Amino acid sequence: MALATFIHDGNSIDYTPGSAVAAGAVVVQGELVGVAKVDIPANGLGALALSGVFDFPKATGMSTAITAGANVYWDAGNSVATTDDDTGNNKLLGKAILAATDDDATLRIRLMQ
């Protein structure tokens, strides 16, 4: 008796937002974090990427450098990637695949769920 039925590879999932979502927007659903690869209209079927490599905004200034290989979280309140999980309030995006200095405004991340 089969317990599970294969649906698809899971690199992206269907998503129907209540309001329009712009390409590049980070969407958090509980512990699941995805990125809209294209614009998704309100109440229209679209898709969120759950895997892949993306450049995300990060804070700049003193003590904001991030090393390659670090776990990185999405700070939805400030719309930046950070190494601070804020006691579980910031959701895991993935791992930094390139180091970023204090002056870098973006960080390259491999998404992981």
Image: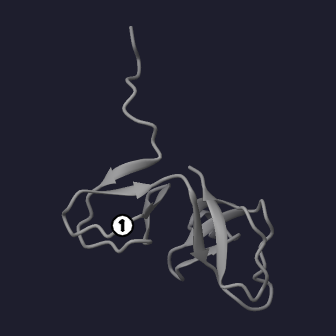
Vertically, is 107 above or below 47? Answer: below
Q: Nearer the viewer, residue 7 or 72?
A: 7
Q: In the displayed image of the protein, which residue is found farthest to the left?
A: 43
Q: Residue at x 41, y 64 (%)?
A: 37
| Quarter of the rendering containing residue 66 | bottom right
- Kindly state the secondary structure of the residue where label 1 is placed: loop
Q: How many marks?
A: 1
Q: What's the amino acid at mark 1? A: Val
In the picture of the structure, the residue carrying the numbered disc 1 is 38
Quarter of the image that includes the N terminus: top left
Left or right: residue 103 versus residue 17 is right
State the scheme by which the image is colored: one colour
Q: Residue at x 52, y 79 (%)?
A: 79
| Quarter of the rendering containing residue 106 | bottom right
Q: Residue at x 79, y 64 (%)?
A: 68
Q: Nearer the viewer, residue 103 or 80?
A: 103
* Other-residue count near label 1 (Cα within 10 Å), few / some / many at <14 / 14–19 / ≥20: some
Q: Position of residue 70 (x, y in %)?
A: 76, 62
Vertically, is 3 above or below 23? Answer: above
Q: Position of residue 47 (x, y in %)?
A: 34, 56
Vertically, is 92 above or below 103? Answer: above
Q: Position of residue 7 (x, y in %)?
A: 36, 32
Q: In the displayed image of the protein, which residue is found farthest to the bottom?
A: 61
